[in-house]
Amino acid sequence: MTARKCLALVLAAVIPAAIAQQNPAARRSVADLGSLRGYWNGANLENRSNCATAGVNGQHGTYAQYFFTVNPDTSMIVHEETLSNLVCDYSGIYADDRFQPSWTGTFSCSDGKSGSFESRGFLITPTEMQVRLQIKLQSSEGCDIDSILGGSRF
């Protein structure tokens, strides 16, 4: 065997392991939910509809810092603090489904806003996250809210 063939065999064995990547088409599992633990900085975006007061309908957004507490087997809690000193807490049960994980529960905010939510949309990477919520306000406004909790971290 020549030196060139020997080097080619060594490189063929070493390089795939060194540059192995995760399959981007692979479904995320419950383990990804656990990676949400801790602080995230980003924005809370809302698209409100069916509100009792027409002027409340439409798109809204604010800077937010989130702290996630996650027990992947049972529950997730999100504590949100906004730039305007609004504080909201979301608490619910997480259900692992390989094709469509879900998180359902209730929330309440320091301004009196409260309601129920459901999520079936999670985007989780080591430095970026997005949790999409379908919210039903239980206040006098009674709005339906499509909300995105998004954030980044190092």
Image (tube, rainbow, N blue to C red):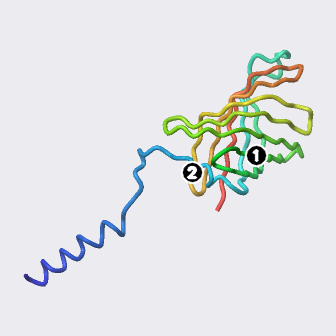
Looking at the image, the residue that sits furthest to the bottom is 3
- Total numbered badges shown on the rendered structure: 2
Q: Position of residue 52 (x, y in %)?
A: 84, 15
Q: Position of residue 56 (x, y in %)?
A: 82, 23
Please, what is the three-letter code of the amino acid marked with disc 2? Asp
**CA separation, marks 2 and 1?**
16 Å
Q: Circle 1: is it few (<14), some (14-19), or many (20+) Cα within 10 Å?
A: many
Q: What's the residue at 79%, 21% (across, down)?
A: 143
Q: What's the residue at 61%, 38% (across, down)?
A: 95
Q: Nearer the viewer, residue 126 or 27?
A: 27
Q: Which mark is residue 32?
A: 2
Tell me which label, 2 or 1, sits earlier in the chain.
Answer: 2
Q: Position of residue 5 (x, y in %)?
A: 12, 77
Q: What's the residue at 82%, 19% (across, down)?
A: 142
Q: Quadrant of residue 91?
A: top right
Q: Which mark is residue 16?
A: none
Q: Quadrant for the C terminus, please.
A: bottom right
Please, what is the three-letter code of the amino acid marked with disc 1? Val
Q: Is residue 40 left or right of residue 32?
A: right
Q: Circle 2: is it few (<14), some (14-19), or many (20+) Cα within 10 Å?
A: some
What element does badge 1 sit on? strand
What element does badge 2 sit on? helix
Q: Position of residue 96 (x, y in %)?
A: 57, 40
Q: What's the residue at 86%, 20% (across, down)?
A: 141
Q: Which mark is residue 78?
A: 1
Q: Nearer the viewer, residue 40 or 74?
A: 74
